[in-house]
Image (spheres, rainbow, N blue to C red):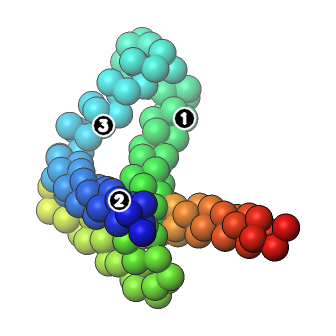
Amino acid sequence: MIKKDILKIMGIGTIVLIILLTFWFSSKPGSVSMGQSDEILLKLNLISQYDIDAGTPEYYHWRFLIRKGAHFFIFLILGIGLALVMEEDVEKIILIIIILAVFDEVHQSFTGRGARLSDVILDVAGGFTGWTMVESLRFFFKKSNEKEREG
């Protein structure tokens, strides 16, 4: 019982953190957001400053992957948090993920950036993947515990 309460508290903390991070990221103008992506790519040594300055195909490839990967990953963490808090309420979890994904895109459109349906789809896919991961672990451990009790 205590483990379940701790997981719920961790889930609530995760949800709040992801919502705040999403709001913060989407409040940045396009130039700032691109600069943040470029900094990450440079720190990971995936590209060089020359790639950025020259606009090489490698730069655009990695920038695309890092930016779209961020959408998926942030919402994957959100899906994990929601699964920890709401457990089996799948419809509400998916609805919350969709609402937050749409809100994120609409919010960033006020900063001069575009709102993209493809980003909403990535967000929802990430959130659903996070939820699926938690539910898969729950299923695995439930089956494992049942086998232990039988044997």
Q: Earlier in the sequence, mark 2 or mark 3?
A: 2
Q: CA distance from mark 2 to mark 1?
A: 40 Å
Q: Earlier in the sequence, mark 2 or mark 1?
A: 2
Q: Measuring 35% from the left and 34% from the top, which residue is drawn there? A: 37
Q: Is residue 51 something one can see in this rendering?
A: no
Residue 52 numbered mark, or none = none
Amino acid type, callout 3: Met
Residue named by callout 2 = 6
Of the residues tagged 2 and 3, which is closer to the observer? 2
Q: Residues within 10 Å of mark 2 (few under 14, many from 20)?
A: few
- Provide residue 100's location: percent of width, then percent of height: 30, 71
- Quadrant position of the C terminus in the picture: bottom right
Q: Residue 69 versus residue 143: which sits nearer the camera? A: 143
Q: Measuring 29% from the left and 62% from the top, which residue is drawn there? A: 9
- Provide residue 4's location: percent of width, then percent of height: 42, 66
- Provide residue 57's location: percent of width, then percent of height: 55, 28
Of the residues tagged 2 and 1, which is closer to the observer? 2
Q: In which quarter of the view is residue 32 placed?
A: top left
Q: Residues within 10 Å of mark 3 (few under 14, many from 20)?
A: some
Amino acid type, callout 2: Ile
Residue 61 numbered mark, or none = 1
Amino acid type, callout 1: His
Residue named by callout 3 = 34
Q: Is residue 111 something one can see in this rendering?
A: yes
Question: From what the image shows, is residue 136 above or below residue 57?
Answer: below
